[in-house]
């Protein structure tokens, strides 16, 4: 079955109790137990809920994993995954990882004696150099945010296998439609479902999928014990969002390609970062592990003044954090997503005052380009 069909028919689309074509929102905290001597599938809604189960089974099917888990946010998902490790464990994380992941790993998990190293994962040797006897996992994000740097997943996975490490991939930017790390041999996939999976800027949620049953037990222990679960209403919104993932992504990606090409021709723009452009570093590696360039791009304006003017004047696109919604969203990383990073470190990473990130939406591209063109004008 092809991916687009699987979004609609993955075995979790019809309610087994009633035949409803939309999984009902099981708004309940607990479940009646007919016979206390007989085990039941659902006993308490932190441990399991049928709406959540449908979502968890759907994402597991779409990411080609054994089991899925829904959490109250992408960060709850990431934090719960990191919680399977123990004091004294060492984890290698790509340096341009999502800001919240950087913060929770370096400022929270280190309090529990986790050892964390951040590396430029664009070169696999940088990961290799950091592996030591207590290293347990490599945590990656590709393409990265906001400069769309590419990590060679197959290279990292084979290095991890040689050293008996787990590979965790934050797959938020690509979604399971464009990239499926578990099929390449990764162990755990994480999504901020707030982004492309929800797709409508109306829900915050996180998803995790694992390949291996033993690993699934470790994650379930944290999900149930720590309890950062996603409520049934929000699970329902994600189930609904998922069904249109392919059509949204196809259209948004086409828009992103056109917008990236158009931006590349503008004198107000110094550089465009998008894996769909022929000269994007790591483009070949990206297309060997993913089926498309996605719908997020960034660009450096020729000057900081132009960038600031653009941010002030842009009107159809929303100015906001977040991405992956039906509407185009522009953000200014140095003041928004990456404001917490010290200036020197930001400059080293290339996150400069003239950088703008764009999550391209479902508008007609001509209207979007007209909005951008107007926003570049001096008056
Ligand atoms: C937004 C985001 C997160 C965090 O997800 P929340 O749902 O906001 O908690 C993690 N990783 C990436 C790549 C993101 O874009």
Image (cartoon, grey):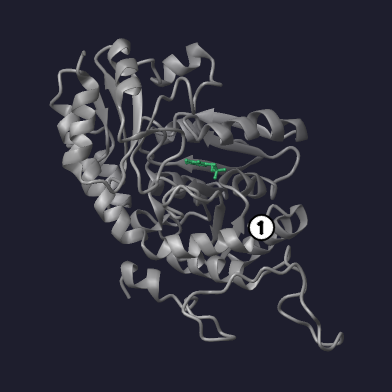
- Residue at 75% x, 52% y: name it: 226
Quadrant holding the N terminus:
bottom left
- Quadrant hosting residue 276: top left
Q: Quadrant of residue 242?
A: bottom left
Q: Which residue is mark 1?
A: 219
Side of 233 relative to 260 (left or right): right
Image height check: is 109 above or below 302? below
- Residue drawn at 57 percent across, 50 percent down: 164
Q: Is residue 156 left or right of residue 379?
A: right
Question: Image point 20% across, 25% down: which residue?
Answer: 374
Is residue 80 rendered to the left or right of residue 39?
left
Image spot of residue 15 (x, y percent): 54, 81
Give whichever of 178, 5 is nearer the camera. 5
- Mark 1: give few (<14), some (14-19) or many (20+) Cα within 10 Å: many
Residue 66 seen in the current view: no
Q: Establish if 275 lies above or below 304.
A: below
Q: Nearer the viewer, residue 286 or 336?
A: 336
x and y, in percent, of residue 93 in the image: 54, 35
Q: Position of residue 231 (x, y in %)?
A: 64, 59
Number of marks present in the image shown:
1
Q: In this picture, is 99 found above or below 353?
A: below
Q: Is residue 50 above or below residue 325?
A: below
Q: Residue furthest right?
A: 36
> Where is residue 262 drawn, in percent x and y?
15, 32
Q: Is mark 1 within 8 Å of ligand 1?
A: no
* 50 with respect to 149 (left or right): right
Position of the C terminus by quadrant = top left
Identify the element where label 1 is drawn: helix
Q: Residue at x 72, y 75 (%)?
A: 42
- Asked whether residue 247 appears in the rendered view, the answer is yes
């Amino acid at each position: 079955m092809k991916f687009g069909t699987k979004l609609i028919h993955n075995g979790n689309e019809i309610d087994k109790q009633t035949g409803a074509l939309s999984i009902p929102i099981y708004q309940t905290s607990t479940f009646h137990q007919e016979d206390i001597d007989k085990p039941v599938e659902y006993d308490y809604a932190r441990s399991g809920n049928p709406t959540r189960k449908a979502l968890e089974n759907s994402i597991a099917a779409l990411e080609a994993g054994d089991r899925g888990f829904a959490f109250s946010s992408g960060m709850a998902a990431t934090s719960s995954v990191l919680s399977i490790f123990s004091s004294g464990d060492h984890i290698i994380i790509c340096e341009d990882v999502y800001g919240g992941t950087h913060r929770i790993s370096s400022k929270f998990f280190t309090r529990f004696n986790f050892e964390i190293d951040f590396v430029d994962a664009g070169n696999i040797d940088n990961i290799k150099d950091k592996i030591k006897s207590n290293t347990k996992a490599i945590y990656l994000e590709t393409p990265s945010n906001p400069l769309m740097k590419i990590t060679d997943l197959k290279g990292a996975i084979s290095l991890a296998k040689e050293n008996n490490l787990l590979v965790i991939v934050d797959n938020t930017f690509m979604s399971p439609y464009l990239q499926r790390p578990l099929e390449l041999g990764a162990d755990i996939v994480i999504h901020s479902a707030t982004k492309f999976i929800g797709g409508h800027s109306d829900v915050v949620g996180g998803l995790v999928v694992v390949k291996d049953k033993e690993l699934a037990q470790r994650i379930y222990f944290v999900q149930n014990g720590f309890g950062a679960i996603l409520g049934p209403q929000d699970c329902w919104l994600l189930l609904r969002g998922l069904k249109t993932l392919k059509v949204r992504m196809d259209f948004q990606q086409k828009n992103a390609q056109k917008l990236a090409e158009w931006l590349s021709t503008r004198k107000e723009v110094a550089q465009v970062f998008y894996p769909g452009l022929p000269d994007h570093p790591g483009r070949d590696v990206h297309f060997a592990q993913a089926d498309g360039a996605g719908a997020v791009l960034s660009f450096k304006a020729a000057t900081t003044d132009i960038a600031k003017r653009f941010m002030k004047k842009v009107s159809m696109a929303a100015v906001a954090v977040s991405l992956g919604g039906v509407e185009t969203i522009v953000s200014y990383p140095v003041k928004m997503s990456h404001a917490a990073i010290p200036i020197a470190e930001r400059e080293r990473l290339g996150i400069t005052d003239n950088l703008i990130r764009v999550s391209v939406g479902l508008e007609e591209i001509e209207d979007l380009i007209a909005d951008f063109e107007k926003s570049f004008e001096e008056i």
